[in-house]
Image (tube, rainbow, N blue to C red):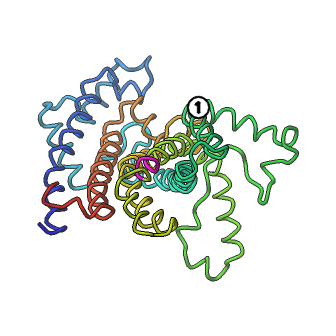
Amino acid sequence: MSRWQYLLKRILLALPVVLFGVTVTFLIVRLGPIDPAAAILGPENGSGAEAERIRRQLGLYDPLWQQYFDYLVNLVTLNMPNSWVISPGTPAFELILIYLPRTMWLGFWSVLIALFVGIPLGFYAGLNPNTSGDYIASFGGIVWRAMPNFWLAVILVSLLAQSKDLLGFEWSKLLVETNIVTPPSIAFFNNPVEFITNPGETFTELLKAIKQVAPAALVLGSSSMGNEMRIGRTAVLETINSNYVETARAKGLSERSIVWKHVFRNALIPLIPIITSEAFILISGSVLVELVFAINGMGYLFLQASVQGDLPLVGALMYISIVLLVSVNILQDVLYTVVDPRVGLEQN
């Protein structure tokens, strides 16, 4: 079986998963206790004639099967109706495109922190077991993994707000002037020509966007960083004591060659599902972290849409999240075949 045939097979098998996910979303939102008309007019006006008119206008009195069919067709054609509550008159997918870049920006730096700090520390601890460096890295990983995101976010915001007194410098004015909690401005991505014509100003805006999202990215990536460090250490210890590594030593291979050609590649295998699953979580954002740092991304949007029963918006958000999760799982299986050639496509 070729890799393209394998991908096609996995995509076909993923379709029922996507259908099940969007169906459950529809049933929870539509059959739940939340009334969109009451969310629009307010709880005190949720039972009058105006509320009845809004329910009919939204199609809430149509047969449930018809509402479900229209919901599926709109998702498949990427033509979800306008938001009901959050931003009436704005198409759901258009509203998502406004909030999505902030979450992607936050997730990008969160993934980088988890990958380029957690994995190297884990491999270092595994290659130097029972040393002071191993103890420090392992203890730090456990502490980072154990701290709840919302608690760490609140502590970090408080620390940055008092940075002049506690740390001796003012965070909001360090390098470039930014607020402590506010959505990052990444409008420079919309005009790449500006980077060529005016690189100085564009670089300043880029630095502001990185600085603005750095504390939230540190909080969001901290638990993943600790998890990858712990699992990476265990994987290196198991690999370095395996029979084929002992055989390589017996053949006279240098320790450097053994580490790079045998230990690292095989130690990455158990990390693949961890990296891919956590990358999805980081990129999809965190409601609590976004609220504390006022990022106002996808997490914030999903919370508001769910609380107020905005079915088109919730449906579109869940559809995107489910498709991303399924895609990450398919990517994970393909990466297995790349990292470990012993895994054949016929076996998957």
Q: How many numbered marks are there?
A: 1
311 w.r.t. 103: above or below: above
Image quadrant where one finds the N terminus: bottom left
Name the one closer to the observer, 281 or 252: 252
Span colored in magenta = 235-239
Q: What amino acid type is highlighted by mark number 1? A: Met
The residue at the point 66 percent across, 32 percent down is 154
Name the one closer to the observer, 347 or 158: 347
The residue at the point 52 percent across, 68 percent down is 190
Image quadrant where one finds the C terminus: bottom left
Q: Where is residue 220 in the image (x, y as percent from the top left)?
A: 55, 43
227 w.r.t. 147: above or below: below
Q: Mark 1 points at which residue?
A: 147
Q: Main secondary structure of the magenta part?
A: helix
209 w.r.t. 198: above or below: above
- Residue 129 appears in which quarter of the rendering? top right
Q: Is mark 1 on a helix, strand or loop?
A: loop
- Residue 176 appears in which quarter of the rendering? bottom right
Q: Does 334 lie within the magenta span?
A: no
The residue at the point 55 percent across, 55 percent down is 120
Name the one closer to the observer, 346 or 82: 346
